Amino acid sequence: MGVEEPEERKEPGDELLGFRSRLLMGVIFAALYIGTFGPRTGWLPGVISGVLGGAVIFLLLKEVDERRKRRRRAGIKPYTPPVRRKHRR
């Protein structure tokens, strides 16, 4: 009876990375950041900065996926770089 929103169709190219891959990239960034800057700046600031940086990486990749989905739904073609032509002399 009520108005229901249409279900989202999942197409193969919708997501650049899945949830697990985005999470893994955030954890890898955090670990590398902590391992690099922990001894230099102190462990507490290194850990805090690494965790926040990992969260930013995760959210950034999530936003990229969301924008890709919106563009695909709107029918906008993905970006293709211009063709480079050689100069004639």
Image (cartoon, grey):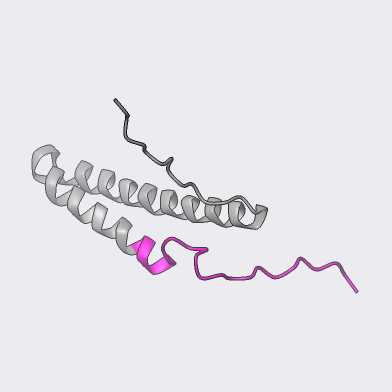
Residue at the spot x=26%, y=48% of the render?
Answer: 50
Residue at the spot x=42%, y=43% of the render?
Answer: 81
Residue 43 in percent (x, y) is at 15, 46
- Residues 78 and 29: in front is 78
For residue 12: magenta?
yes
In the figure, residue 19 lies in which quadrant? bottom left
Quarter of the image where the C terminus is located: top left
Outermost residue, right side:
1
Looking at the image, is 85 positioned above or below residue 28?
above
Residue 87 in percent (x, y) is at 32, 30
Give the side of residue 68 with respect to residue 18, left or right. Answer: right
Looking at the image, is 88 positioned above or below residue 27?
above
Give the magenta-colored segment's residue range: 1-23
Residue at the spot x=66%, y=52% of the render?
Answer: 74
- Residues 81 and 65: in front is 81
For residue 19: magenta?
yes
Residue 77 in percent (x, y) is at 57, 51
Quarter of the image where the N terminus is located: bottom right
Task: Tally the marks.
Answer: 0
Looking at the image, is 19 positioned above or below residue 58?
below
In the figure, residue 2 lies in which quadrant? bottom right
